[in-house]
Image (cartoon, rainbow, N blue to C red):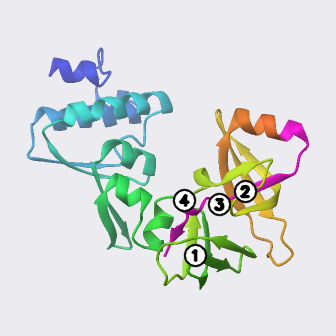
Amino acid sequence: MRELIEKFHLLGLEEAYPVRLSGGEQQRVALARMLAAEPELILLDEPFSALDGILREQMQQKLPGLLHGNNYLMVTHDMDEAYRLSDNILVMENGKMLAFDARERLFDHPPNLAAARILGLRNVSEAIRVQENMILVPQWGCFLECGGKQKVSHVGIRSQHVRISTSPGVNSFMCEIVRILEDRFTATLFFRLLIKRTRDVLLQAIVDKERWEYMKKGGHSLFACFPPDKLLLF
C-alpha cells in the first residue's frame, strides 16, 4: 500500500478525512484503493477529469504500468487519453456501438462517418465519385485526386493532415486564413478556399507554430493541400 501512496502522490495525506481532500486527491485515493484490492476487472470512468494538466500527464504515464496484468475498461471523452492508455477502443453513441478496433487502425481508418467525427475528424463534406481517381466535393467547390473505394458519399481529412504551404501541389488550392487559435506549440488555422464555386465554408488545419510564424512573415499566397493518401472516404 505504501508503494501505491507514493505513486499516486498521496504522501502526508494518509490520516486526512475525505472533506480535507481536493477533488483530484479524492480521485487519486479512489484509484489507489481500487488497485490495492487487486480486482479481476477494473472499471475507470473519466479517471483524470479532476486533475490539473501536469498531474494528469504524470498519471497517464504511470497508469499503464500500474495496471499491467489487469483487465480494465475505461470510459473517456478525451481521444488523446484513449489513444495513450488503450490498445483497443470501442466508440459508442447514444448507447450504440459504432466501431471497435485496435487504436491505430481505428484512428487511421475509421469504418464510418459517425465514428470518425467522434474520433476528431473536423473537415468533412459530401462527395461524388466522378472518375476512377477523382471525386467532386461540392461544398468545398473543388475536385480532388483520390483513389480507393468507388462508392463514396463523404470525404474527410484530419486537421493535422491538411498542409498549408506557400507553393502549390497535388490537390492544392489558394486559401485565406480567417481565424487562428494558438496553443503553446501549434496553431489551428481556420481557412476558406478561394474558389468561386465554394460556399462560405471554413476548414481547419493544425500546423507547427514556428512554421506558421515563418509563413505569415513572407507575405506569399497560401495554398491548402489535401494529400490523396490522407483523405478518408465514406
Q: Position of residue 2 (x, y in %)?
A: 17, 18
**Is residue 113 depicted above or below 18 in this figure?**
below
| Pair 3/2: label in front | 2
Tell me if I can see residue 227 in this picture: yes
The amino acid beneath tag 2 is Gly
How crowded pointer 2 is (Cα within 10 Å; few <14, some 14-19, many 20+) is rated as: few
- SS at circle 2: loop
The amino acid beneath tag 4 is Lys
* Precedes in sequence: disc 3 or disc 2: 2
Q: Position of residue 182 (x, y in %)?
A: 71, 41
The amino acid beneath tag 3 is Phe
Label pair 4/1, CB-CB below 8 angstroms? no
Label pair 4/2, CB-CB below 8 angstroms? no
Label pair 4/3, CB-CB below 8 angstroms? yes
Q: Which residue is mark 1?
A: 133
Farthest residue, direction front: 132
- The magenta region covers 216-234
Q: Which residue is mark 4?
A: 230
* Residue 226 numbered mark, or none: 3
* Precedes in sequence: disc 4 or disc 2: 2
What residue sits 58% from the left and 70% below the top? 146
